[in-house]
Image (spheres, grey):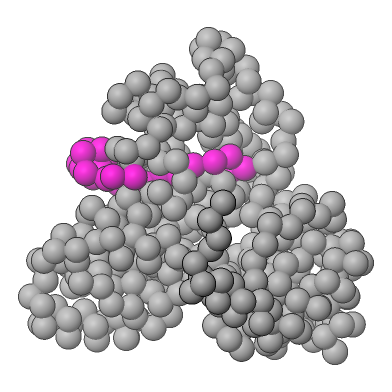
Amino acid sequence: MQKLPINLVKRIEQRIQENSFRDLGNTLKLTDFSSNDYLGFASSEALFSKSYQTLSEKKLLKNGATGSRLLSGNHELFKPAEALIAGFHQTEAALIFNSGYDANIGFFSCVPQKEDLILYDELAHASIRDGIKMSNAKAYKFLHNDLEDLRNKILRKREDFNAAAIYIVTESVFSMDGDFPDLVALSNLAEEYNCFLIVDEAHASGVFGEKGQGLVQELEIQDRIFARIVTFGKALGCHGAAILGSRELKEYLINFSRSFIYTTALPPHSVACILEAYNSLETSESTNSEVVKLQQNIRSFQKEILKKGLKPYFIKSDSAIHCCIIPGNDTVKKLAHKIQIEGFDVKPIRSPTVPKGKERLRICLHSFNTKEDIQNLVKLLATFIK
């Protein structure tokens, strides 16, 4: 077998020296404060059983989709799933993709054209940035959640390039900080300058809104957004994603989005799981739902870090993601290990995933975390940090 080229070996050696080398570790059997399974749906036996029942009733006991959706893979679960998703999110249409990454690269590689302009938040997810790199449009980042910087760039870049269309890109909840922009003000700005606003709701779906519809719907601005990306591998506990928007946008993506056209479709069991996860959200009692429990745990965690004097260490967040800044790859890795020894699964986020000096413990809250778990974790943090 041929060895790795020397220039690639050197890149790996550099990562090891910087203590930023990534590997595939084992899943820790600890109290979960690291996964994106915000509502516990990924391990729900009830959801698993309902998905299997749906497949049995439809006689779709198949292991694969057999092809792309434009060939042989458009099995009968896609239509009701996309209709349910569109209705739940109060939009005209939804188009399912195989992952959030596929959805973002599929959208940005084909929608903005050569004569267009993309302005994206500097902390936008890697999938958004990779999709933008594949686009022929000009693209520039604006300062994180800074609407004045965005406004200035709209005025300056529109004049410089005489752009046919301007696309503004942000996330409703940022995956590494857990914060979010002022989406109402952002939508006002987009309308003022006739821009198209795209919002990635990956970490807001299932977390915000009475039934987990997302932050856009909680703010009642869904009719002012050109496109939303929702993912199913986080709060919904499944796999895949969907782009929400107009019927015309859906038709365009079916015809021009390469990550949709040139890939095998999701198998029936994946789509059945998506269907049942949405049914669970739709039919849940608003007073005792997993969404409500999660929101209660978020407030409990905020109270605990305030009580223990840890607020200055944390990035402000009202989401399920809370980040404690611990500068230095070595330092944050050692602190995470200490916490794991005590039985809590908390992961260190090291550079280059985040900028140097902004290394952190990323704590994800869930509906199934107990009040005692939250109190004990914060108590440990206070002991080790102080």
In the rendered image of this protein, does residue 252 appear above or below residue 150? above
In the rendered image of this protein, does residue 106 appear above or below residue 337? above
Residue for point 32% across, 86% down: 149
Q: Quadrant of the C terminus?
A: bottom right
Q: Nearer the viewer, residue 34 or 320?
A: 34
Q: Is residue 209 visible?
A: no
Q: Position of residue 204 (x, y in %)?
A: 53, 57
Q: Quadrant of residue 52?
A: top right
Q: Decide if residue 323 is on the left or right side of residue 308.
A: left
In the rendered image of this protein, does residue 249 appear above or below residue 265? below
Q: Quadrant of residue 47?
A: top right
Q: Position of residue 295 (x, y in %)?
A: 67, 58
Q: Decide if residue 379 is on the left or right side of residue 17.
A: right
Q: Position of residue 301 (x, y in %)?
A: 75, 69
Q: Nearer the viewer, residue 87 or 105?
A: 105
Residue for point 14% across, 64% down: 114
Q: Nearer the viewer, residue 134 or 17?
A: 17
Q: Is residue 49 visible?
A: yes
Q: Decide if residue 278 is on the left or right side of residue 343.
A: left
Specify start and end residues of the magenta stretch as a single range: 236-259
Q: Quadrant of residue 296?
A: bottom right
Q: Position of residue 13 (x, y in %)?
A: 62, 76
Q: Nearer the viewer, residue 6 or 207?
A: 6
Residue for point 92% across, 67% down: 342
Residue for point 38% across, 26% down: 67
Is residue 69 a member of the stretch shown in magenta?
A: no
Is residue 242 a member of the stretch shown in magenta?
A: yes
Number of numbered labels in the structure image: 0
Q: Check the image and name the residue furthest to the front.
A: 1
